Structures are given as C-alpha cells and as structure tokens.
C-alpha cells in the first residue's frame, strides 16, 4: 500500500515538475530605455525645489529604523521623531494633523467639494539591512556618468548599477558608504510635503481633497496594521514608495509561506542500521525536491519563486521555512501543490518519520482590485500624459502596503520617488526625478 502510494506520488511529482512553467513563457519586461531630460530639470518656476530637497536632507538625518523583534506599536519609539517633524512641517503650512496612539500620522487638506478624496501614503521607517543612524547625505552635482566614491572602501559606477547611466547631468544625493540613505521612503515623505506646500501657496488651483497618511513599521510588514481607513478618508490612494519616476506600479506578488516540520528517529549511530531516520537528511531531501530553477536567484520579471529562508535541524528534528511568490494566483496554487506533493513523497518513502506541512497566505496581488477599480490608475495616467511624461508599469517583485489597502477597499497603486538601490549603502536619490515626482503628485491631485 505504502509502496504503491509512494510510486504514484513520485510519478505525479515528476509530471508536475516537468510541466511547471511559473510564467517563464510570459513576455519579458523590458527595462525602460530613456535618459533623463535635462530640460525639465532642475527647477520648475513655481515649485520650491530647493526647499523640498532641504526637507529631504533633514528627514534622512533622523534615525527611524524599525525593529522587527519589538512587540510595541510602533516598533521603535524613534520612528516618531520623523512623524513629529513631518507634523510640524505640515502645521507650518496650515495643514492640521494628528499622530494617533499607534504612531500613524493622519492629515487632511480640503479640496473641491464633490470630488473624490485622494489619499497619499509614505512611510517614516528605514530598512533593517543596514544602519540608518548618522546618515551623512552628500550631493554629487551634475553627475558625469563615472565612478562615485562613497568612501575608501566603497564606490559605485554604472557598471554595477546600470540605472546610474540614466542620470548623467543630474544632481544625485549619495551616502558616505556607512549607512543607507533613507530615500526609501523619506523621498516619498518629502515629495508629499512639497506637493502640499505648492497647493497651499496656490489657492487658485482647484484640487481634490487630500488625505495624508504617514506610517511607521512598513519595512517590517506592519505599516498597514492599525490604519483607520475611516480616519484616513481616501476613496483611492497612492503609496509614494517606488523608484523610477515614470513607473505606475499596479501589480504585486501573491504571497504565501510554507513551514515543514520533520520528526525523525534518533538512535546511536553505531546501532542505527534499519532504525535511524535522520530528520536533517530528510530536510535536505525535501529541499532537493523543490526545483532549482524557480529559486529567487534564477527568476525575474513575472517569474515566481520558492525561497528557502531558513533551515535548521538535528537527527531528531528539522524544520524548513519557505516563502512562495507569484504574480499569478493559479501558478502560486501550483507551487503550493508542489510542496504538498514533496511532503507526501517523503512521507511515503520514510513511514517512520512524522512530516507536517503548513502553508499560509500572506498578501495578494493588488492588480485583481485595481483592474476592477481603475480610477487611481487612470488618474495617474492622465497626469503623466498631461505633463508629457511617458509612463511605464512593471510588476513589483514584492508587496506594498498599497496591496493591503487595495484589498481593504482603498485601491492604491505605487508611484516613484526618484530614489534607487533601496536598503543599502549604494542607495541614491536622483534630484531631477525627485523634482519631477513633486510635479506629478501635484498634477494627480488637480481637479
Ligand atoms: Zn519603502
């Protein structure tokens, strides 16, 4: 019985693996091929770009790293130092706001009656991979396309970072190589502030009511938690948390995670014949059943992946933790099925082991919602077209808080900031793109 079952499972498993596609046949997304147009850079007469950049440089100097090991909300008290600074800057503009007990900052700017209230969201915290304390931003004026020396140990050039080649003639803000920059997402914070500054100083411009939301803890996946959508008040919204200024992002991964626990049979190795079932060896065997080519390091564009995040074990017990990602929900279901088959295969082969598999969903591709409620996308698209900017759209290989907001009833694409190389010392801001984003946000908000 067990043998027969085992063979059937193995066969099934082989058939699934052979037919597994995961989107590789999909059209490859092309990198946007454009160079920055120096004629639209750096200053638009009416928007105070110097003040906008000044605000950005002020924000990045505030250490706001969130803390995934903290149970508090927000996870780190220091995140609020920036929220308070933003609130102060808003109040200077006459925009009233409040930071609630969960550290969410809400603020509203009145607009034309009868128009949909538009939401803008950015986050105040920075990533965990590298320190965000003592950030010393430096401006590289009129970038010449060559190597930028960050410090004695680190430098960057278009060879390793091809996006740099698009910014020749532009001013860049870079790090001193010891920290991240915090363009993610303080560029978003500063863009939103600059857009508000402009609208407040130009009362003749008719615009939508604006609902602002600045969140802590985005980098640890808790940014959308505790958000009071009623208090926010947006009909649809934008996260200002992307990179390239031409990108209107409407597609995220569908996400799930899988945990495999293996209970083996531990006996003295000298006396193990026919008795020992080594849980760690089974863990390795399980991972070997997950096809090599659908791992993160071999995938791009719309190709999904299974990623072994953690493996641990001894003879007695072992565990594996995977994240599963795909833009296509049906393909994600196939990936889950593959994990079930791998577990069944091992169970059949090692009846003395106890193998348990648990698969849980994390977030879903917001495209599903944005296709049904396209207002936010169409409004952004119209703004780009009005400004004569060719927009692009690439699937995000990750999730956004906008995906969560979308499923909660506030459709929420992601737009750019002009900051690149997130979460590391090579992070930089294109001042030209940052300025362009301020114009784009203003245009989106116009009546
Ligand atoms: Zn971000």
Image (spheres, grey):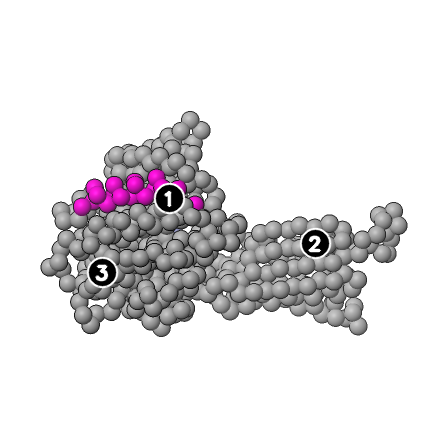
Residue at image position (78%, 64%) is: 351
The percent coordinates of residue 190 (x first, y second) are: 28, 48
Q: Magenta span covers which residues?
A: 48-65
Q: Indicate left or right for 391 with 362 as reference.
A: left
Instruction: Tally the marks.
Output: 3
Q: Which residue is mark 1?
A: 182
Dominant SS in magenta: helix
Task: Describe residue 128's horizontal placement relative to residue 283 as left or right.
Answer: left
Position of residue 283 measured from the top left corner of the image (x, y, whole percent)? 69, 54
Q: Determine the residue positioned at 80% across, 53% down.
A: 266
Residue 371 vs 189, above or below: the answer is below
- Residue bearing mark 2: 318
Mark 3 or mark 2, which is nearer the start of the sequence? 3
- The residue depicted at 64 percent of the width and 66 percent of the height is 340
* 262 drawn magenta: no
Sequence-wise first label, 2 or 1: 1
Percent position of residue 14, x then y: 65, 64
Locate residue 195 relative to residue 244 in the image: left or right: left
Instruction: Kindly identify which numbered label has been placed on residue 109.
Output: 3
Q: Quadrant of the N terminus?
A: bottom right
Q: Nearer the viewer, mark 3 or mark 1?
A: 3
């Amino acid at each position: 019985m067990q043998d027969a079952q085992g063979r059937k499972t193995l066969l099934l498993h082989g058939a699934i693996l052979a037919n597994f596609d995961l989107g590789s046949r999909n059209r490859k997304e092309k990198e946007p091929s454009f160079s920055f147009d120096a004629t639209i850079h750096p200053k638009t007469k009416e928007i105070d770009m110097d003040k906008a950049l000044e605000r950005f440089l002020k924000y990045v100097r505030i250490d706001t790293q969130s803390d995934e090991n903290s149970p508090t909300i927000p996870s780190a008290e220091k995140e609020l130092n920036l929220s308070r600074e933003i609130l102060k800057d808003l109040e200077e503009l006459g925009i009233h706001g409040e930071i609630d007990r969960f550290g969410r900052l809400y603020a509203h700017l009145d607009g034309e009656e009868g128009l949909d209230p538009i939401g803008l969201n950015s986050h105040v915290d920075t990533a965990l991979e590298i320190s965000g304390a003592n950030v010393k931003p430096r401006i590289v004026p009129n970038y010449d396309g060559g190597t930028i020396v960050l410090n004695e140990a680190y430098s960057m050039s278009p060879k390793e970072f091809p996006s740099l080649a698009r910014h020749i003639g532009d001013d860049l803000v870079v790090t001193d190589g010891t920290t991240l920059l915090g363009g993610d997402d303080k560029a978003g914070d500063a863009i939103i502030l600059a857009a508000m500054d402009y609208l407040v100083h130009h009362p003749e411009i008719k615009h939508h009511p604006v609902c602002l939301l600045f969140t802590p803890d985005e980098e640890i996946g808790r940014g959308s938690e505790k958000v009071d959508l009623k208090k926010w008040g947006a009909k649809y919204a934008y996260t200002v948390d992307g990179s390239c200024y031409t990108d209107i992002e409407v597609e995220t991964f569908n996400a799930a995670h899988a945990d495999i626990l293996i209970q083996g049979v531990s006996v003295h190795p000298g006396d193990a014949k026919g008795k020992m079932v080594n849980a760690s060896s089974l863990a390795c065997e399980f991972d070997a059943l997950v096809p090599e080519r659908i791992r993160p390091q071999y995938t791009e564009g719309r190709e999904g992946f299974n990623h072994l995040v953690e493996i641990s074990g001894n003879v007695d017990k072992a565990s594996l933790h995977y994240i599963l990602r795909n833009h296509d929900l049906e393909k994600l279901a196939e990936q889950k099925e593959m994990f079930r088959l791998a577990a069944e295969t091992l169970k059949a082969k090692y009846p003395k082991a106890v193998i348990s598999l648990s698969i849980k969903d994390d977030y879903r591709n917001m495209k599903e919602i944005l296709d049904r409620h396209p207002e936010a996308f169409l409004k952004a698209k119209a703004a780009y077209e009005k400004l004569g900017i060719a927009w692009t759209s690439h699937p995000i290989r990750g999730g956004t808080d906008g995906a969560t907001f979308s499923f909660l009833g506030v459709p929420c694409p992601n737009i750019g900031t002009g900051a690149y190389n997130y979460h590391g010392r090579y992070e930089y801001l294109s001042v030209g793109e940052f300025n362009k984003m301020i114009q784009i946000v203003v245009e989106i908000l116009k009546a």
